[in-house]
Amino acid sequence: MSGADRGNSSPPGSDGGSRLGIFGTLVRIEALKTTKRLAFWVTTGIFAGFNALFVISAVRTAIRRPNITFALPDSWSRILEPPANIGPFFVGVAMILLLAPEFSWRTARQNVIDGLSKKRFYAGKIIVLAALAVLFLVIPVGVGYVATLFSPSEGGSPIIGPADFNYMIAYVLGMLLWGSGAFMLAALLRSSGAAMGILFVYLLLEQILSRLMTELSETLGPATDFLPAEVQSTLANAFLHYPQLLAQENAMRAEQGRPLLEFRDFELLAVVALAFSAAFLITAFLSMRKRDL
Amino acid sequence: MVVSGRADVYGEPMAIIETFELSKRYGTRRANSVLAVDQVSIAVEQGQVFGFLGPNGSGKTTTIGMLVGIINPTGGSFSLFGASEPRDLVAARARVGATLETPNFYPYLSGRDNLRVTAAIKGVGQPRIEECLELVGLADRAKHRFRTYSLGMKQRLALAATMLNDPELIILDEPANGLDPQGMKEIREIIRILAGRGKTIFLSSHLLWEVERTCSHVSIVRKGRIVATGTVEEVVSAGTAALLKAEDPDALEAALADYPGASSVRRLDGGVVVALDSDDLGTLNRYLAGLGIHVSHLAPYRQSLEDVFIDLTEGDFDSMTEIAS
Ligand SMILES: Nc1ncnc2c1ncn2[C@@H]1O[C@H](COP(=O)(O)OP(=O)(O)OP(=O)(O)O)[C@@H](O)[C@H]1O
Ligand SMILES: [Mg+2]
C-alpha cells in the first residue's frame, strides 16, 4: 500500500510537527489567505495614505515656515500621534475582515476538517493580530522616517529616544486592545457586518456609559479612566509620553486659567490594556472551543 | 509495511470509524432543541465503502461533522483509527480527507491557491496539488477564482482537496450533489479506484442508486436513528416482500393495508407489493381468501435498496407529496 505512506507521515499541521514547524505552517497559511485579500490591502492602503498625507503636510510646512521644524528625533511625537489615535481602529477593522468571513464562508470549518485543530486555527489568527500590529507600526514609522529625509529641518542624533519607544509601545498596546476586542466580536458574532457595526457603535456606547458612571456615583467616576476606549486614547496621547510637551501645554493652560492636564501612570494603563486584551482573547477562545463550526 | 488501522494488538480487525451511542442535540433549551443524531452506533472497517443513507434532515451531516471535529457531540463517543482522545484525534484526522455539505473555499482565491491553503494544512507539496487538479479535471481552470466556479466545479475542487494528502479514510457528504451524469460517473469511478487501493470510504447520500452502485455496506438513518445496517445485500434481503396480483387491485391494496403483518403496501404497475414482517406467504394467502379476494399472482419479491429505504423512512416525505398534490 504505497499510497498510504504520504498519509501516514506526520504533516506539520498534525501533532507530529515541531513547534517551529507548526508556527511556520500557520504563518504560511495565514499569509496565503491574507496577501490576496483585496479588502485587506484597501484597509492597509487607506491607513498608509492617511499617514503619508499627514507627514507630507508636515514637510511642506517645514519648507514654508522654517521655524516649525520637522526632523528626527524631535518630530516622533508628531509622526506617531495620528496613527496612535486611529491605527488601533484600523487594526480592529482588519482583524474583523480577516476572521469573521472564515465563519460565513465556512472555511474555518474546512480548515479544521483538513486537519488544523480549532486551537491551531485560533493560534493562526493570533499570529495575524500580532502581524497586523507590527505592520501598522512599521507603516507610520517608515513613512514618517522617509518624509523627514525630504524636510529641510536639521535633525539630531540618535534619531530615536526612550520616550519615542514608549510611545510606540503604547501605540502597539492600543492596537492589541482594539484588535483583540475586534477578534472577540468576530469570533462571537461570526459576521463581519455585525462585528464592524458594534465596533463602530462601541465608541459611542462607552461615552454614554462613562457619563452614566460619572453621574451615578463618586467612586465609579474615576473608574471611567479604565474603560477600554478611554485607556487606548490616553495611551495614544503624546502628552503622556513627553513630559516637556505636557509642561508646555500646562503652562499655557495655567496662563489661560484652564484646568491642567493630568495622566495616570503609563505602566498602570499598559497593564490595564494588556488585561483587557487577554480577557477579550480568552473569551474568543472559549467561545470558539465550545461552539460548533 | 504494516498498515496501521488494519488490526489491533489482538489481531481483531479494527474499525476505522466506530461510534458508540453518538448523539447530538442542537440548542440548549429543551422546548426548541433538535435531537439531530440519536444514539448512533456504527462500525466502518478497513476497505469498506460505507454508505450512510437517509432522507433530508436525518442527521447525516451532523454525524459526519462530529467525526471530523467541527461539531461537539452531546452524548456517546467515537473513535477514528482507534483514537478517541482529543489529542490523538487531531493526529488521526491527518489520515482523513473529508468534505462536508457544500464545498467551503476562499471565494477570492483561485482554485489552485485554495488547494495551497489545504496543502499547507496537510503538509503536502506543490506537485501533488497539480496531480489532484489534473485528476478532477480542473487543471485548466485552476487559476480562476473559486467565486467564478460552477457548482460542479466547486464539488470537483472539494474532491481534489479531499485527496491531497492521499488519505486512508475518505469521508464524503453528498459527493454527487450538483454534478452532471458524467461527473457522477467520474465520482463513482474515483471511488472504485480508491477502494481498490484499500482506502476506506464513508459517504452520505440520499441517492439510493448511488449507494447501491458504489457501496459495499450501508446504514440507513431516519430522524437521527439507525434503522438498518449491514452489507447492501443484507439490508436489501432483510425485508421480505411479496408481489400480488388480483382482479380488483384496489380491494387487494385495501385488504393488504389492514393486514397485521404488513409494514408497507405500494402499487406497482399491474400489482401490489407488500413488505412483510415474516416470509409466511401461506398465512397471507389465507387472510386474503378469508376476505374473498382471490389472487392471480403471489410470489416473493426482491426489493431494491430504494424500496427498503422508502419502507424504513416512510412518513418523512409526506409533507413534500402534500405540497405537490
Ligand atoms: N446548526 C444547527 N442548529 C440547529 N439545528 C440544526 C443545525 N444543523 C442541523 N440541524 C438540524 O439537525 C437535523 C439534522 O440535520 P443534518 O444537516 O445533519 O441532516 P442531513 O441528514 O445532512 O440532511 P440533508 O440530506 O438535507 O443534508 C435537522 O433537523 C436540522 O434542522
Ligand atoms: Mg446533509
Image: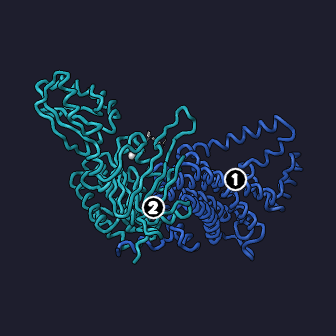
Kind of residue at badge 2: Asp
Q: Residue at x 72, y 52 (%)?
A: A233
Q: Residues within 10 Å of mark 1 (few under 14, many from 20)?
A: some
What residue sits right under mark 1 in the picture? A279
Q: Is A37 positioned to the left or the right of B188 in the image?
A: right
Residue B123 versus residue A190 in the image, above or below: below
Provide the letter of the chain coloured blue.
A
Q: Earlier in the sequence, mark 1 or mark 2?
A: 2
Residue B286 versus residue A194 in the image, above or below: above
Q: Say which element carries label 1.
A: helix
Q: How many marks?
A: 2
Could you tell me residue A47's position as x and y percent?
58, 57
Could you tell me residue B284's position as x and y percent?
22, 31
Q: Quadrant of the N terminus of chain A?
A: bottom left
Q: Is A55 positioned to the left or the right of B56 in the image?
A: right
Residue B117 versus residue B238 in the image, above or below: below
Give yes or no for contact between labels 1 and 2 (Cβ–Cβ under 8 Å): no
Residue B209 versus residue A67 in the image, above or below: above
- The subunit carrying tag 1 is A
Here the colouring is by chain
Q: Residues within 10 Å of mark 2 (few under 14, many from 20)?
A: many
Question: Quick check: can you spot residue B137?
Answer: no
Q: Nearer the viewer, residue A170 or A61?
A: A170
Residue A114: mark in rendering: 2
Q: Nearer the viewer, residue A69 or A113?
A: A113
Provide the letter of the chain coloured cyan.
B
Q: Residue at x 59, y 47 (%)?
A: A188
Taking the image in four quarters, ligand 1 sits in the one at: top left
C-alpha span from label 1 to label 2 = 29 Å
Could you tell me residue A48's position as x and y percent?
57, 60
Kind of residue at badge 1: Ala
Q: Is B44 positioned to the left or the right of A160 in the image?
A: left
